[in-house]
Amino acid sequence: MTRRMTDASLRFNERRRREDEAPRLHERLPALATLRLEVEERRSGSVSTETKHVRLVVVDSAPALFVLPCGDSSCRDGGHDLTDGVLRSLAAGKTRFELEDGCLGNVGSSTCGRVLRVVGLATYH
């Protein structure tokens, strides 16, 4: 097994452990019915989006944990923990919210700095 595969496996296992140990989203926010996260990522200093996708959260089974990996495959020890911002927005009953986070990982000897922008769309019971 290559070192890269081993590193990826370790990160995956750690993420899975954190998800398994986290409280469930429906327990933390019982009024939440649906959650859609529109995710865009770009290089620091760039105005154009490099990647864009939608994440539909299954509220009944999802962990109350919102940690997204960095989109740069060369980034080490990076990622985006949006948990506090997402939970704070949802607890406030917001139906739309925006969050932005810079990656603090490393690409070579430099800070990664990729920027993740998330637009959350929620409905409540």
Image (cartoon, grey):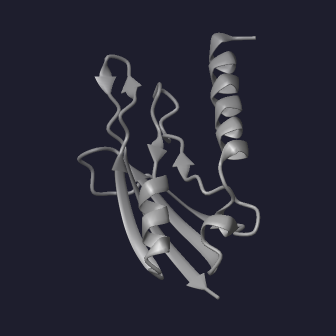
The answer to which image quadrant residue 13 occupies is top right
Q: Is residue 57 visible?
A: no
**Where's residue 39, x and y in %?**
49, 60
The answer to which image quadrant residue 80 occupies is top left
Residue 40 vs residue 46, the one in the foreground = 40
Question: Relative to 21, is 8 above or below?
Answer: above
Which quarter shows the C terminus?
A: bottom right
Question: Relative to 51, is 76 above or below?
Answer: above
Task: Tell me the residue at 75%/69% (across/down).
Answer: 60
Task: Tell me the residue at 47%/39% (across/down).
Answer: 79
**Where's residue 58, x and y in %?**
72, 67
Q: Is residue 46 left or right of residue 22?
A: left
Question: Relative to 62, is 106 above or below?
Answer: above
Q: Is residue 103 visible?
A: yes
Residue 17 vs residue 46, the one in the foreground = 17
Residue 28 vs residue 10, the one in the foreground = 28
Q: Residue furthest left?
A: 45
- Count every numbered label the image shows and give the total: 0
**Where's residue 113, x and y in %?**
32, 38
Task: Tell me the residue at 38%/68% (across/down).
Answer: 98
**Where's residue 36, x and y in %?**
58, 72
The answer to which image quadrant residue 10 occupies is top right
Task: Tell me the residue at 69%/59% (across/down).
Answer: 24
Which quarter shows the N terminus?
A: top right
Residue 48 vs residue 28, the one in the foreground = 28
